[in-house]
Image: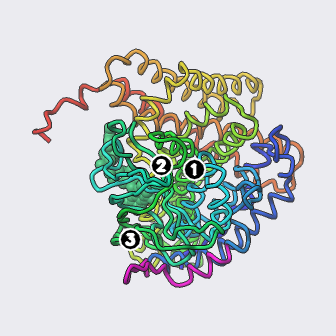
Amino acid sequence: MPIYNAPTKDLQFVLHDLLNVSEQDIPGFDDLDRDFTGAVIEEAGRIAAEVLHPLNVVGDTEGCTLENGVVRTPTGFKAAFEQMKEGGWTAMDCDPEYGGQGLPYVMHSAAQEPFVSANMAFNMYQGLTHGAYSAIHAHGSDAQKQTYLPKMVTCEWTGTMNLTEPHCGTDLGLMRTKAVPQADGSYKITGQKIFISAGEHDMAENIIHLVLAKIEGGPEGIKGVSLFIVPKFLVNEDGSLGARNGVAVGSIEEKMGIHGNSTCVMNYDDATGYLVGEEHKGMRAMFTMMNEARLGVGLQGYAQAESAYQNAVAYANDRLQGRDVTGPKNPDGPADPLIVHPDIRRNLMDQKSFVEGARAFTLWGAYLIDRAHRNSDKDADGLISLMTPVLKGFLTDKGFEYAIAAQQIYGGHGYIEEWGMSQYARDARIAMIYEGANGVQALDLVGRKLAQDGGKHVMGFFEMVKTFLKENEGNEALKKDFLDPLKAASKDLQAAGMYFMQNATKPNNALSGSYDFMHMMGHVCLGLMWARMAKAAQEALDAGASDKAFYETKIATGRYYMARQLPSTAMHLARINSGGDTVMALDAANF
Ligand SMILES: Cc1cc2nc3c(=O)[nH]c(=O)nc-3n(C[C@H](O)[C@H](O)[C@H](O)COP(=O)(O)OP(=O)(O)OC[C@H]3O[C@@H](n4cnc5c(N)ncnc54)[C@H](O)[C@@H]3O)c2cc1C
């Protein structure tokens, strides 16, 4: 049985030593003192470890079943969902007007990590509901908000996001689902959506589907897409549940991972739908909640790597194989534990330095979202918009890579289901695909975000790195191990940015390098996070922090990232500079 313990101390370190949340001039942040955030994270960690984690393997092995139109979730999911609802965990950052607790998004994200690490498939029921809540909250009418949000905040009603159709996932302009206006102002929705997470299940009284569809006679392509609320059960004037709507699950998918989450084909047959926001502005409505949704998927990536890493460390300490090359460490035993071997150390350090950097990057992103929303800060909004494809694409690629790396520590046992390591890799894999496949994230970054507002946000990011380097140039403890590598990597990133500017009229050149740029930027972001964390840890040590080992470990882990991971920006730059010719050289027939 795999283990999981919430990294409460690391989460607190990021919130307080790195982000200084309680000192920020953002409404609601002054409540986030160490005692409060500590209590929330401890309790989230306890529930994650004691309630959700034991159900992770159950969900994987049992999966969901469909019988007579009813989807049953795995044993124990329903009771655990009730516990999450009763504890108010579904409502943390939701609007108090609709029953939420109004806590900052950064607090919500910090509490989410243990839930996602412990049981990603389970947490998606609540995660999708949160996404649907945000879309209605941002774009719904007052009446829609009053009707749906209070029940969605508590997860008595869950939510879904219906974009994908059999013939289109990325290119949603090809969508065929139709919406026909009715005399009473509602619409009749007809069409098929596939791969709908939590589309049908037995844990909620009602399911509120958010559906993208084209209103008949509207503009062609993506400009003709509108967003609709389609409840499973229609809601009466008094808020009680009415007739069953014309939406039904057709089948559930057999898939590689997240077996505990139902992935449904949803058939809409003259289903009653209610327009959210304006006609033909459905994509805009979806996009306003994209930053949060994609940050949440990035979190899934590193949260799976965190769980896998914890198990890999335990195994490396336990499994006896071979001897330490510098002399036995377990002379009375038949062999030394795996953890003595440099190559095992390399692998574990790769995992550890990624996960801790990713946690900082994600919570920094969540803090930017709070700053953008709560302070109406346009720069923060622009910066998080730039970072969103990086948070999603880089963290999920690496999260999967390190879930596999953790599996490798187990040798053959990692490949055997009994040890639970394959589940982390299988579950992590989907995060690279949904919510916009990672190749499309790279496209968004290079094709759209770099040039957004005249390149202001990427220039702002370069400036931020430059300012940090300048402010700390006299810090000898940081210079060689942190500042110099960050400076070099940032220079690589700027050179790549320059290449894209010079190749703006040669799209094949630019887009052949987009994936490399996304990874390069991810590395620079983690490098910046590590330099800041090292500084914070050094300051804590200088101030006589009692937990010396914790802060020294932080600095040593950061040093590893800067020395062994960050230099990959040079390789990415070389690839980008090689242009698109080698990428595009073959005729399609020659593949
Ligand atoms: C388990 C699971 C859960 C899901 N949950 C949901 C959900 O809740 N709601 C929902 O609406 N959808 C959901 N999806 C669908 C998911 O979001 C899509 O599968 C995804 O967006 C990709 O769409 P597609 O599968 O049609 O691939 P395609 O769009 O056909 O893309 C195939 C490949 O081509 C690449 N590609 C496409 N266009 C370009 C381009 N212009 N340039 C470069 N590369 C390109 C993509 O990156 C991808 O690698 C889910 C999918 C799965 C498997």
* Total numbered labels: 3
Q: How is the image coloured?
A: rainbow
**Magenta segment: does it hold 528?**
no
**Residue at the disc numbered 2:** 227
Disc 2 to disc 1, C-alpha distance: 9 Å
For numbered disc 1, what is the local secondary structure? helix
Residue at 46% from the left image edge and 36% from the top image edge: 518
Residue under numbered circle 1: 135
Q: Nearer the viewer, residue 494 or 508?
A: 508
What residue is drawn where x is 85% and y is 41%?
23
Does 239 appear above or below 12? below
**Mark 3–mark 1 distance (CA, rounded to whole Å):** 23 Å
Q: What residue did someone put label 3 on? A: 249
Compared with 235, 535 (above or below) is above
Report, in whole angstroms, how far the alpha carbon at label 3 lies from the one at label 2.
Answer: 20 Å
Where disc 3 sits, the SS reads strand
Q: Nearer the viewer, residue 449 or 114?
A: 449
Q: Is disc 3 in contact with disc 1, using a CB cutoff of under 8 Å? A: no
Image spot of residue 357 (x, y percent): 62, 46
Q: Is residue 488 visible?
A: yes
**Comparing labels 2 and 1, the label whose residue is closer to the camera:** 2
Residue 430 circle label? none
Q: Nearer the viewer, mark 3 or mark 2?
A: 2
Q: Residue furthest front?
A: 183
